[in-house]
Amino acid sequence: MISPFDPENAPDPAAAVLRAEDLHCDFLTAEGIVYAVNGINLSIGRAEIHGLVGESGCGKSISARAIMGLLDRKRSRVKGGVLFDGKNLLGLSERELREIRGKRISMVFQDPLNSLSPLETVGKQIAEAISNHYDLPKEELGRRTAELLERVGLHPGAAKQYPFELSGGMQQRVMIAQGISCEPELLIADEPTTALDVTIQAQVLDLLKNLREELSLSVLLITHNFAVVAETCDRVSVMYAGHIVETAAAGEFIRNAAHPYSKALIDCIPRGRGKGAAREPLPVIRGFPARQYERPGGCPFAPRCPRAENACGGLPPLRDMGGGHLVLCRRPIGSGPPSGGALPARGEA
Ligand SMILES: Nc1ncnc2c1ncn2[C@@H]1O[C@H](COP(=O)(O)OP(=O)(O)OP(=O)(O)O)[C@@H](O)[C@H]1O
Ligand code: SF4
Ligand SMILES: [Mg+2]
């Protein structure tokens, strides 16, 4: 099997800021084991915006939380490697992780109001994010907070306001200011724009792109939206039922998606309604994803795949399509016999 971390295959592994290697995450529940993440490999380059897409429940947020060490250790079982600065984060103690979390890797969530305290001013909350890691005098904290607010496109006077006094887009900017307050190498943004309207969404994504340029920040951007992938991401990984089924440069992915699942999703994007059409949420394709109570075995997409055939038994090897384009499929599109065609959207068949 080809590893994306083999120097022959990864785009630039030496430049990876973080690598998840064969990362698994199971939950132990009263109903049984939920196999949420099933051996993903993910390499996030320096100053790269890496999109992670896939339908609801496929394991995007759990992967991010496992990388950050944010899962309850009693209820979940995380295995594999999360390599960052020469260390496997999965082997660190909670105290060691706290040194990294918020300082060198930080996370921004979809709903700022769930993450910001309603009782404290925005300025105080940003200053606290800095004080968690640096012992700075009060004036210096104030100066740094004002700088951060300006950097994310807010007036420094916003420091005195409470979150509820700000719009959704402004709250998300505050979350990003907190996220970059200690100048992390990696920001994980879990659907940071899903709750925002299209114009504000575009502004927040432009902000992430600017921060990537200005701070050489790497971003793992979790999204449902292919327009975000096309317009914002350098590379993209597609998740399906706890597996990463395809990784490619964003442009190559949109033009030449090779996994039947990715291709079906791209083919379902409505055409001919202008740029806004691609801003619609991830389309729903026919059939249902694999049940995550079942121990993963063969190809996770086989029950829904129009290209499935007898040779598809067993978990497919990761296949290199060239130029760092990796696909978890025995019969990727563009590699052999003609495609069985895209899946019809639900309700179209
Ligand atoms: N605490 C938990 N206990 C058991 N199962 C869980 C738990 N948290 C998540 N899961 C399961 O893990 C799987 C992956 O969930 P995850 O939140 O990562 O999905 P997602 O891809 O982020 O979806 P969405 O796009 O809706 O945010 C789901 O099947 C979910 O039901
Ligand atoms: S391995 Fe076979 S069943 Fe699985 S996605 Fe590829 S073609 Fe479809
Ligand atoms: Mg999620």
Image (cartoon, rainbow, N blue to C red):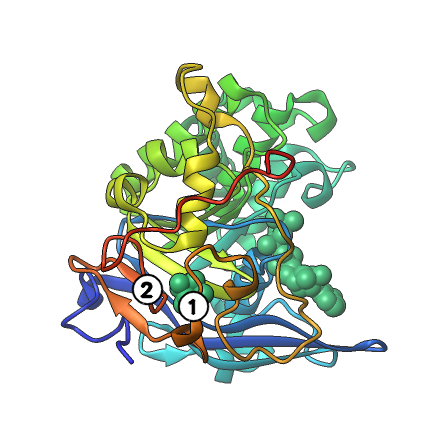
Q: Residues within 10 Å of mark 2 (few under 14, many from 20)?
A: many
- Which residue is label 1 attached to? 309
Examine the rendering and report whether any part of residue 72 can be seen: yes
* Dot 2: element: loop
**Image quarter hosting the C terminus:** top right
* Location of residue 21 with respect to 321 vertically, above or below: below
* Dot 1: element: loop
Q: Which mark is residue 184?
A: none
> Ligand 2 appears in which quadrant?
bottom left
Which comes before the other along the chain, label 2 or label 1?
1
Q: Amino acid at mark 1?
A: Glu
Total numbered labels: 2
C-beta proximity under 8 Å, tags 2 and 1: yes
Q: Which mark is residue 331?
A: 2
Q: Position of residue 169 (x, y in %)?
A: 57, 25
CA–CA distance in space, label 2 to label 1:
9 Å
- For the residue with label 1, is its CB less than 8 Å from the closest atom of ligand 2? yes
* Location of residue 33 with respect to 241 vertically, above or below: below
Q: Amino acid at mark 2?
A: Arg
Q: Position of residue 200 (x, y in %)?
A: 52, 21
* Location of residue 105 with respect to 1 vertically, above or below: above
Q: Residue at x 49, y 54 (%)?
A: 106
- For the residue with label 2, is its CB less than 8 Å from the closest atom of ligand 2? yes
**Image quarter hosting the N terminus:** bottom left
Residue 193 position by quadrant: top right
Q: Position of residue 343 (x, y in %)?
A: 49, 45
Q: Residue at x 67, y 25 (%)?
A: 161
Examine the rendering and report whether any part of residue 143 can be seen: no
